[in-house]
Image (cartoon, helix red, strand yellow):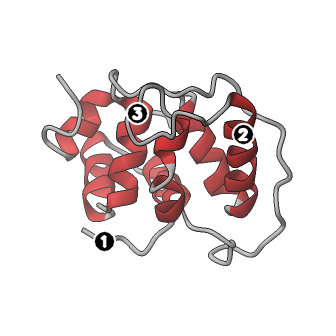
């Protein structure tokens, strides 16, 4: 369970897939901790984020694969932006949360940053990517 592709590369391949079965195969063949966590963050009804709109952030002009940060690292800190997560420091203010989010987004490749914020806004904007299809690819990942 370790795809070498960035999440946006998986989603681009998914968008190009001609059929439902092929789309499921794309997800399964690119299975990774990061992909599963992005899908859960975007689609699980019990996961809620404190971020309600995308902040304005500076998109770095970096070649693909050479961002300062990677989605896996960014996802390991996603709890900072969740509502009622016990790992979130009680003293974390909304202002500081927004500062941390800006730093996170600006450290990712632009396409990965777009996915990170889209996940928090619960709208990945990937045609045909539905909770039902995700559960067909990864049984039990999302509640039925």
At label 1, counting other C-alpha atoms closer than 10 Å, the crowd grade (few under 14, some 14-19, many 20 or more) is few
Question: Which image quarter: residue 130?
Answer: top left
| Sooner in the amino-acid sequence: mark 1 or mark 3 | 1
In the displayed structure, 116 sits above or below 65; it is: above
Between the residue at mark 1 and the residue at mark 3, the CA separation in whole angstroms equals 27 Å
Check if mark 1's residue and mark 3's residue have beta carbons within 8 Å. no
Element on which disc 1 rests: loop
Q: Which residue is mark 2?
A: 96
In the orientation shown, which residue stands out farthest toward the left? 139
Identify which residue is drawn at 74% across, 75% down.
63
In the displayed structure, 53 sits above or below 64; it is: above
Q: Which residue is mark 1?
A: 2
| Sooner in the amino-acid sequence: mark 3 or mark 2 | 3
Check if mark 1's residue and mark 2's residue have beta carbons within 8 Å. no
Between the residue at mark 1 and the residue at mark 2, the CA separation in whole angstroms equals 33 Å
Residue 66 versus residue 10: which sits nearer the camera? Answer: 66
Q: Which residue is mark 3?
A: 85
| Sooner in the amino-acid sequence: mark 1 or mark 2 | 1
In the displayed structure, 45 sits above or below 138; it is: above
Q: Position of residue 67 (x, y in %)?
A: 68, 72
Identify which residue is drawn at 67% across, 38% down.
97
Residue 125 visible to the viewer: no
At label 3, counting other C-alpha atoms closer than 10 Å, the crowd grade (few under 14, some 14-19, many 20 or more) is some
Residue 17 versus residue 99: which sits nearer the camera? Answer: 99
* Res 90 label: none
State which quarter of the image contains the N terminus.
bottom left
Check if mark 3's residue and mark 2's residue have beta carbons within 8 Å. no
């Amino acid at each position: 369970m370790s795809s070498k592709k960035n999440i946006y590369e998986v989603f681009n391949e998914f968008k190009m897939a001609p059929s439902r079965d092929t789309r499921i195969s794309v997800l399964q063949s690119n299975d990774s901790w990061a992909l599963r966590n992005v899908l859960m963050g975007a689609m699980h009804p019990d996961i809620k984020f404190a971020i309600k709109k995308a902040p304005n952030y500076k998109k770095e002009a970096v070649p693909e694969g050479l961002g300062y940060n990677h989605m896996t690292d960014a996802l390991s800190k996603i709890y900072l932006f969740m509502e009622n997560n016990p790992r979130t420091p009680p003293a974390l203010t909304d202002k500081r949360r927004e500062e941390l989010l800006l730093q996170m987004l600006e450290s990712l490749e632009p396409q990965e940053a777009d996915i990170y914020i889209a996940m928090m806004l619960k709208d990945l904007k990937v045609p045909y990517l539905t909770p039902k299809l995700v559960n067909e690819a990864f049984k039990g990942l999302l509640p039925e």
